[in-house]
């Protein structure tokens, strides 16, 4: 009789253990502090140069009877090993005060890149990744991607499709004349009448991001911007550039380095020492000579002996984020808020 009682007690304890070790979905609970926010499976996030590029900031959209608002869960940066640190360089775990809000009423998340010194009142313009949140028994979770409409949206989706499924060409030409090897224009022809950048590579001014193309001089590891732009069918923001010659620039993105004035480089772009690539860059960022580490068309060598009248075709087949130094998919992360 005594042995039977012990056996029954053991069975009851086993069922009790199983009951309390699983939530309603049959998944073991996180046993983490409620309201703590965790990033899992991050991709293409890396350290920012905080003095120039600012910080990442996580925002959670919460709704109630009065409407919805984005609440800041803190500014942070990634270390090269993937760890999070706050603005003082200390280990950081994003968190919101869930004593005063309902965790189940959080339905969207957004990561912005905020310029240095910006207040955490509302999200800035540079939306990096975003996504819907779903309530589960053990968490509120969701996938945040650059392809989300609240982030970069269509352009990021097209870049991801191009990277995976097909080749797209970006055509580079030079203007005719004696200095034709000292300039680059994104055009099918020498007049700029036919843009060399696909029409879908278009960003909206004031929405946080622009494109910026760069020439890399391999011989001395220096970088020269060809100008920031939003679309391929109009001139970029600096026209032909400060070192242009007397010929007018084309009505497409591009740059010339013809002038011998102080500060202007002296090179031939067809000497086999130059590469060309295109980045996406926050609109607030201005750091001459230093490309933003978010490359959408990776390094492409300008061939030795490239002649006037030729055009160079760039195959935009890889998306690359040099913050972590490897080819990658469009940036994303999986976010989980513990319940």
Image (tube, rainbow, N blue to C red):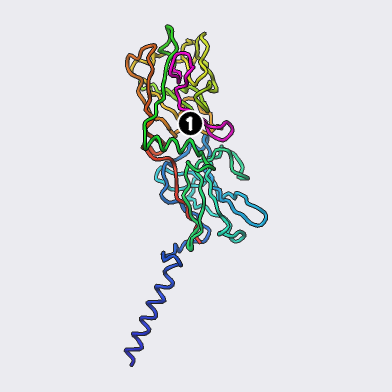
- Crowding around mark 1 (Cα neighbors within 10 Å: few <14, some 14 to 19, many 20+) is few
Q: Foreground residue, 288 or 319?
A: 319
How many labels, in total? 1
Q: Is 211 drawn above or below residue 179 in the view shown?
A: below
Q: Foreground residue, 181 or 286?
A: 181
Splitting the image into 4 quarters, where does residue 164 fall? top left
Q: Which part of the image, by quadrant, shows the N terminus?
A: bottom left
The magenta segment is: 184-210
User: Which residue extends farthest top?
Assistant: 178
Write the residue at 53% across / 33% down. 209
Write the residue at 40% across / 74% down. 17
State the predominant SS element of the stretch in magenta.
loop
Residue named by callout 1: 200
User: Which residue extends farthest bottom?
Assistant: 1
Write the residue at 39% across / 39% down. 324
Q: Secondary structure at mark 1?
A: loop
Image location (x, y in percent) of residue 155 = 48, 35
Indicate yes or no whether the magenta region holds residue 127.
no
Indicate yes or no whether the magenta region holds residue 199.
yes
Image location (x, y in percent) of residue 32 = 47, 61
Image location (x, y in percent) of residue 245 = 50, 10
Image location (x, y in percent) of residue 182 = 43, 13
């Amino acid at each position: 009789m005594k042995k039977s009682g012990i056996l029954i007690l053991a069975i009851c304890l086993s069922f009790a253990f199983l009951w309390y070790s699983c939530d309603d979905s049959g998944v073991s609970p996180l046993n983490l502090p409620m309201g703590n926010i965790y990033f899992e499976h991050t991709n293409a996030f890396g350290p920012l140069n905080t003095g120039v590029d600012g910080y990442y900031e996580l925002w959670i959209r919460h709704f109630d009877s009065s409407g919805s608002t984005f609440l800041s869960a803190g500014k942070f940066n990634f270390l090269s090993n993937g760890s999070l640190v706050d603005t003082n360089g200390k280990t950081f775990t994003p968190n919101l005060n869930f004593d005063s809000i309902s965790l189940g009423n959080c339905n969207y998340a957004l990561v912005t890149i905020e310029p240095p010194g910006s207040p955490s009142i509302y999200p800035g313009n540079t939306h990096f990744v975003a996504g819907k949140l779903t309530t589960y028994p053990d968490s509120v979770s969701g996938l945040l991607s650059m392809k989300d409409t609240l982030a970069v949206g269509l352009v990021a989706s097209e870049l991801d499709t191009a990277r995976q499924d097909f080749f797209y060409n970006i055509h580079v030409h030079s203007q005719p004349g004696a200095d034709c090897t000292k300039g680059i224009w994104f055009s099918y022809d020498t007049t700029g009448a036919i843009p060399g950048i696909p029409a879908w590579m278009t960003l909206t001014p004031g929405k946080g991001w622009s494109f910026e193309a760069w020439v890399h001089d391999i011989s001395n590891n220096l970088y020269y911007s060809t100008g920031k732009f939003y679309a391929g069918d109009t001139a970029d923001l600096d026209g032909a550039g400060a070192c242009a010659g007397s010929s007018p620039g084309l009505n497409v993105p591009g740059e010339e380095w013809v002038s011998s004035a102080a500060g202007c480089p002296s090179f031939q772009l067809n000497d086999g020492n130059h590469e060309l690539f295109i980045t996406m860059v926050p609109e607030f960022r201005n750091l001459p000579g230093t490309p933003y580490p978010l490359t959408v068309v990776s390094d492409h060598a300008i061939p030795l002996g490239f002649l006037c009248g030729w055009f160079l075709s760039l195959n935009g087949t890889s998306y690359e984020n040099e913050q972590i130094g490897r080819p990658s998919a469009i940036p994303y992360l999986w976010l989980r808020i513990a319940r």
